[in-house]
Image: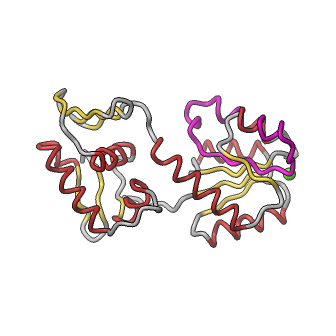
């Protein structure tokens, strides 16, 4: 059972910027770690995958762009959200960053508010993309492209909200989520609905899953999880 805080890795060699960014991330409720070069960044990512990386362009050992290419070339990290931090404001540099697989870029100097807004937007954008491949847990198979769900090879009728909820659970099995986390991650924090709405959708989801409903566990006073155990 884990309810990890979002971890963000800062790859930046200028101490003043590291300090400002770390402070900003902590104030927004995220965990932050920082490294000062691409070698340490690569080592960190391999050991502990962050939810997002803020990557400086000009680093002492290699350019941030080189690290970006290396990360994107690795299947394991190909979906890792990355924002490039750059002092360069020239159009071709922005294009190069995006072409190498950056999800966004932010030009120095930036305000803490702007940074926080960009990170939130990217995390929101990325969550629904988790696992665009076919997901399978026990007898349930979910195809995010055709939006179909089968249970023991039989297709089921499922509502849009229940589909999104099931997809999220299947992308994050064996992890418990609170109602407010599910609201944020499944519906996005721009949607204003009450936490008990989550209960309604979980109830409906269990109904359509029939015997496979046992996979959706209620974790008393915490929330819900999908578990085969
Ligand atoms: Ca730098």
| Residue 121 forms part of the magenta stretch | no
| Display coloring | secondary structure
x and y percent of residue 31 in the render?
A: 60, 63
Residue at 70 percent of width and 52 percent of height: 54
In the displayed orientation, state which residue is furthest to the top: 153
In this rendering, position of residue 188 left or right of residue 179: right
| Residue 69 forms part of the magenta stretch | yes
Residue at 24 percent of width and 45 percent of height: 159
Above or below for 74 versus 174? above
Q: Nearer the viewer, residue 195 or 18?
A: 195
Residue at 73 percent of width and 64 percent of height: 21
x and y percent of residue 106 in the render?
A: 75, 52
Q: Where are the magenta residues, as a range?
A: 68-95
Q: Which of 174 and 178 is in front in this view?
A: 178
Q: Nearer the viewer, residue 10 or 110?
A: 110
Give the quarter of the image for residue 75.
top right
In this rendering, position of residue 11 left or right of residue 27: right
Q: Quadrant of the N terminus?
A: bottom left
Q: How many tags in the picture? A: 0
Above or below for 171 versus 218? above
Residue at 56 percent of width and 38 percent of height: 79
In the displayed orientation, state which residue is furthest to the left: 211
């Amino acid at each position: 059972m884990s309810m990890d805080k979002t971890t963000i890795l800062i790859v930046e060699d200028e101490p003043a910027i590291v300090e400002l960014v770390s402070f900003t991330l902590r104030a927004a409720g995220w965990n932050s770690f920082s490294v000062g070069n691409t070698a340490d960044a690569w080592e960190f990512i391999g050991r502990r995958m962050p939810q997002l990386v803020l990557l400086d362009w000009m680093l002492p050992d290699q350019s941030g762009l080189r690290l970006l290419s290396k990360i994107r070339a690795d299947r394991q990290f190909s979906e890792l959200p990355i924002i490039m931090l750059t002092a360069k404001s020239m159009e071709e540099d922005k294009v190069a960053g995006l072409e190498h697989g950056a999800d966004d870029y932010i030009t120095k100097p930036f305000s803490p508010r702007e940074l926080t807004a960009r990170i939130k937007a990217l995390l929101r954008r990325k969550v629904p993309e988790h696992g665009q491949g076919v997901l399978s847990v026990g007898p349930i198979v979910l195809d995010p492209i055709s939006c179909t769900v089968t249970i023991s090879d039989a297709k089921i009728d499922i509502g849009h909200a229940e589909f999104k909820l099931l997809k999220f659970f299947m992308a994050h099995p064996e992890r418990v989520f609170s109602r407010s986390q599910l609201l944020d991650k499944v519906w996005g924090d721009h949607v204003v609905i009450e936490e008990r709405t989550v209960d309604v959708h979980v109830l409906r989801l269990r109904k359509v899953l029939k015997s496979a409903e046992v996979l959706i566990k209620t974790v008393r006073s915490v929330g819900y999880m999908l578990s085969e155990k």
